[in-house]
Image (spheres, rainbow, N blue to C red):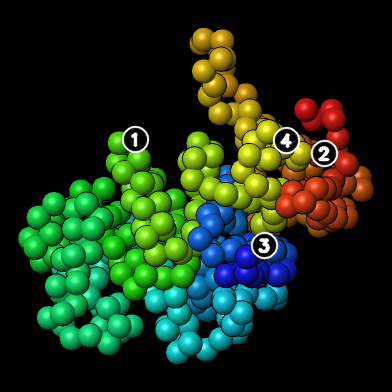
Amino acid sequence: MSNLLQIEGLETGFETERGLIRAVDGVSFELQKGKTVGVVGESGCGKTVTAMSIVDLLPKPSGKVLGGRISLNGRELTGADQEVMQRVRGNEIGVIFQEPMAALNPVQRIGKQITEALILHKRIGKVAALKEAVKLLESVGIPSPERRVIEYPHQLSGGMRQRVMIAIALCCEPDLLIADEPTTALDVTVQAQILNLISKMQENIGMAVMLITHDLGVIAEQCDEVIVMYAGRIVERAPVLELFSNPLHAYTKGLLASIPRLDSERKTVLPTIPGQVAPIHEFVAGCRFCQRMKRSGKSIQERPDYLEIKPGHFVEQCPECTEEKND
């Protein structure tokens, strides 16, 4: 099966008062048509920056892609001008942003925000676009879509705003959907509805999905492949069943151990990973999980090799983080 999205050695940085800092450091992966890849890791590990690099929505002028290649359907996106990216965003790549209230324009009606993409990419008139917007709101499960289409974001609940974001992201039937924590701050019932909706839309139009989340339960249910990011790098990547049954990196094992289990003894404290992700400007050249564990020597001085251990299963091969003692 051909790759829809191909990322090779992506490096993304920001100009700050401390100088240039790298938030994404040599990330490589590919995504096939119709498949779902889950990107997991703690806050500050580079998940959202990686996604925003793909669609060139980094904060300007400080954020910039420093190196690597990004291609979609075999077409190079790295360094593409804004006219090209405007044709890609919303048309070939749809984005569900992390916080719908911040992503939606508070002073524009819902219908206006949906029809904008339809008019731009599908070249249809305003009346036809508004009718299409009503159908889209109905398709994402919003009741009374004819009334909601003339309302403002603050008049909708959090779940409805998230559904509006999905409608905007899917209105042009994109080849790739980037969903950045699409269920954050939603109750469990609405979370399930949102995820089912994305799966249904994916099945209907055959798009690929890049799902960014902290929830490993969502990863297990929704994804074909998992990418575990830590401190701007991919530390492990594998098919979902392989990763859950045979994690190799200490950080992956720590994340999986922190999930509540039905067979756990009642009223016991969940395992946690000690320490926290280092500030970006303090990242070491070597293994950054070793930095967190306050190890010294060669492990934090030289970057470990990123190797394919078995077909489809890649890991950052730090001896300290992949030895049996981390089991």
Q: Quadrant of the C terminus?
A: top right
Report the Cα–Cα distance between label 1 and label 4: 28 Å
Residue 94: % across, % down: 41, 68
Which residue is situated farthest in the left direction here? 147
Q: Name the amino acid, label 3.
A: Phe
Of mark 1 and mark 4, the one earlier in the sequence is: 1
Report the Cα–Cα distance between label 3 and label 4: 20 Å
Which residue is situated farthest in the top direction here? 266
Of mark 2 and mark 1, the one earlier in the sequence is: 1
Q: Residue at x 68, y 33 (%)?
A: 245
Q: Residues within 10 Å of mark 4 (few under 14, many from 20)?
A: few
Report the Cα–Cα distance between label 2 and label 4: 12 Å
Q: Total label count?
A: 4
Of mark 3 and mark 4, the one earlier in the sequence is: 3
Q: Is residue 51 above or below residue 305?
A: below
Which residue was labeled with disc 4?
Answer: 246
Identify the disc placed on residue 70.
none
Identify the disc placed on residue 29.
3
Q: Nearer the viewer, residue 96 or 171?
A: 171
Q: Which structural element holds mark 2?
A: helix
Q: Name the amino acid, label 4.
A: Asn
Query: Given contact means CB atoms under 8 Å apart, are the residues at marks 1 and 4 in contact?
Result: no
Q: Quadrant of the N terminus?
A: bottom right
Residue 147: % across, % down: 7, 60
Query: Given contact means CB atoms under 8 Å apart, are the residues at marks 3 and 2 in contact?
Result: no
Q: Residue at x 74, y 44 (%)?
A: 289
Which residue was labeled with disc 1?
Answer: 188
Q: Name the amino acid, label 1.
A: Val
